[in-house]
Every structure is written in C-alpha cells, then in structure tokens.
Image (spheres, rainbow, N blue to C red):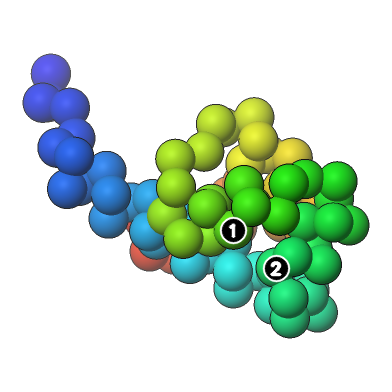
Amino acid sequence: MKNPLTKAEEDVCLKKLGERLRYYRKLRGFSNYEYFAYEIQMSRTQYGKYESGGNIQFSTLLNILKALDVSVEEFFAEGFN
C-alpha cells in the first residue's frame, strides 16, 4: 500500500480542484462566484473557499457538479492523475 498524501500533495490537489470548479463555473456563464453560490443556495464565503483550494466534502462536490451539469468523469478527466 502506498503512503497517504503529504500535506503539500493534498494542497496541490485541492488547488487543482478549485481551479476546475472556477473553470466550469465560468464556462456555464457565471462570471461571479458569489452569484453562482447564491444560485445554488450555498454560502458565498464557503464556495469561495472551495475555489481557492479549501477542503471540500465529496458530497458537496457532487452537488456543485450537478448544479454545473458536469459529470464526475468529465470534471476529473484533466489535471488529475
């Protein structure tokens, strides 16, 4: 079994995840993350943390992806190994 991710590796992955969220939000026409958060009834502060690389629960990510109409496979298709 491989060793778990280091804190630095985890931070890199979360930053990539946040970048992907931002990419798909903008692709769907939401230039402002606060407006998108409002539309999906999520705290603007919390959503902003996710796009900045904050830790996110998988169930929360699934709900955001559903709102963005993006499949899990599509979301993780690029930038993640």
Q: Is residue 58 visible?
A: yes
Image spot of residue 62 (x, y percent): 68, 39
In percent of the image, x 59 and y 73: which residue is there? 23
Image spot of residue 79 (x, y percent): 38, 64
Q: Is residue 45 left or right of residue 37?
A: left
Which residue is labeled 2 in the image? 33
How far apart marks 1 and 2 lie (CA) works out to 7 Å
Q: Is residue 14 left or right of residue 49?
A: left
What residue type is disc 1 on?
Answer: Gly
Seen from the viewer's position, the closer of residues 54 and 13 is 54
Q: Which mark is residue 10?
A: none
Seen from the viewer's position, the closer of residues 2 and 12 is 12
Residue most extreme to the front: 45
Q: Which mark is residue 48?
A: 1
Disc 1 crowd, CA 10 A, few/some/many (<14, 14-19, 20+): some
Return the disc, 1 or 2, that comes first in the chain's sequence.
2
Disc 2 crowd, CA 10 A, few/some/many (<14, 14-19, 20+): some
What residue type is disc 2 on?
Answer: Tyr
Image spot of residue 25 (x, y percent): 70, 69
Residue most extreme to the top: 1
Q: Is residue 81 visible?
A: no
Q: What is the quadrant of residue 61 in the picture? A: top right
In percent of the image, x 82 and y 67: which residue is there? 35
Compared with 46, 28 (above or below) is below
In percent of the image, x 18 and y 40: which residue is there? 7
Circles 1, 2 touching at the beta carbon (< 8 Å): yes
Image spot of residue 39 (x, y percent): 89, 57
Q: What is the quadrant of residue 26 in the picture? A: bottom right
